[in-house]
């Protein structure tokens, strides 16, 4: 998908559904293009709304035919595996337009808030380009997180290594299109396009509500502590809650309701989301946090 203004300006790419079960990004891109055609003041907006059609058709994260994770196949190879060939087609097309920013739209746990992920910086990433991506992460209006591991084969990582600012947006639950998450994603993209002067200034910039203590902060991602017991999770905190070190956020009981364990936060931070399952075993994550 593409729309180009008569006036030159920034180039922005939107990508979605690299994981076939993460469908909300497609709907967000549909809404962007419904509105942008008559409102684009300058530049170009491009999109791949469905990067993994095979995974979508089978409601699978991976490319079902080859069992590959497409977002672990970049930059791809023209004569490689199925996943590498798809990745190469996507990557080379994006690169050819010399974009100023790429936003890769994903989904997270069912009960989660939207947030932005900035890749961990590698030695091959230009500092100026990386700092630009970091600046854009704040422009989304979402809670911003720094990736805690290096994902060498992801789309965003390889774009940054090729001097293209890129961010990952996690936009709530997978499998279904939740209209609230569509609205939040649309707000974040309007923030970005407005900051680039590609659309008219917004009357009010969207900002996901957090306390002054955390405004503008770049968090680190954590899914610890893990459970040390088997049982049924009773959640004591919800997505979006601010949490303090030592605060209980879940308890684990057995099938008869007998208490097995109380799980407490090991850092101050924000609850990003909690497990899709109420069954837990030792060593499994219960909640994800942005920690300060």
Image: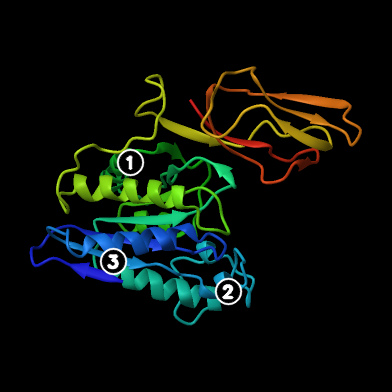
Q: Nearer the viewer, residue 106 or 164?
A: 106
- Give the answer, above or below, for where 14 lies relative to 117: below
Q: Quadrant of residue 130?
A: top left
Q: Quadrant of residue 213?
A: top left
Q: Nearer the viewer, residue 112 or 162?
A: 112
Q: Which residue is mark 1?
A: 134
Q: Nearer the viewer, mark 2 or mark 1?
A: 2
What is the CA distance from the residue labelled 2 to the residue labelled 1? Answer: 34 Å
Q: Which residue is mark 3?
A: 46
Q: Which residue is mark 2?
A: 57
Report whether 97 appears left or right of 254.
Answer: left
Badge 3: how crowded within 10 Å, few (<14), some, or many (20+)?
many
Q: Nearer the viewer, mark 1 or mark 3?
A: 3
- Give the answer, above or below, for where 84 lies relative to 257: below
Q: Residue 44 in the image: x percent, y percent?
A: 20, 64
Question: Quick check: can you spot residue 88?
Answer: yes
Q: Residue 254 in the image: x percent, y percent?
A: 88, 33
Q: Which is more N-terminal, label 1 or label 2?
A: 2
């Amino acid at each position: 998908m593409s729309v180009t203004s008569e006036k030159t300006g920034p180039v922005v790419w939107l990508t979605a559904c690299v994981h076939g079960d993460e469908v909300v990004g497609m709907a967000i891109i549909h809404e962007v293009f419904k509105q942008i055609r008559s409102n684009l003041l300058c530049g170009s907006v491009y999109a791949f709304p469905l990067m993994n059609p095979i995974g979508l058709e089978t409601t699978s994260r991976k490319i079902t035919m080859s069992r590959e994770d497409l977002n672990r196949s970049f930059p791809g190879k023209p004569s490689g595996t199925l996943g590498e060939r798809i990745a190469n087609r996507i990557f080379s097309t994006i690169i050819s337009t010399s974009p100023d920013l790429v936003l890769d739209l994903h989904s997270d746990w069912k009960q989660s808030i939207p947030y932005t992920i900035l890749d961990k910086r590698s030695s091959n990433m230009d500092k100026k380009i990386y700092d630009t991506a970091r600046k854009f992460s704040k422009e989304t209006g979402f809670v911003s997180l720094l990736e805690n591991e290096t994902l060498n084969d992801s789309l965003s990582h390889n774009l940054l290594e090729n001097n293209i600012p890129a961010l990952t947006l996690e936009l709530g639950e997978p499998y279904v299109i939740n209209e609230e998450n569509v609205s939040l994603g649309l707000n974040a993209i309007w923030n970005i396009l407005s900051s680039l002067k590609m659309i008219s200034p917004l009357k009010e910039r969207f900002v996901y509500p957090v306390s002054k203590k955390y405004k503008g902060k770049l968090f680190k991602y954590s899914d610890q502590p893990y459970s040390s017991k088997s049982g049924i999770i009773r959640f004591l905190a919800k997505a979006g809650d601010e949490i303090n070190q030592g605060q209980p956020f879940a308890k684990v009981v057995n099938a008869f309701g007998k208490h097995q364990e109380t799980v407490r936060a090991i850092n101050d931070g924000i609850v990003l989301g909690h497990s899709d399952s109420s069954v837990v075993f030792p060593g499994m994550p219960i909640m994800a946090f942005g920690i300060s």
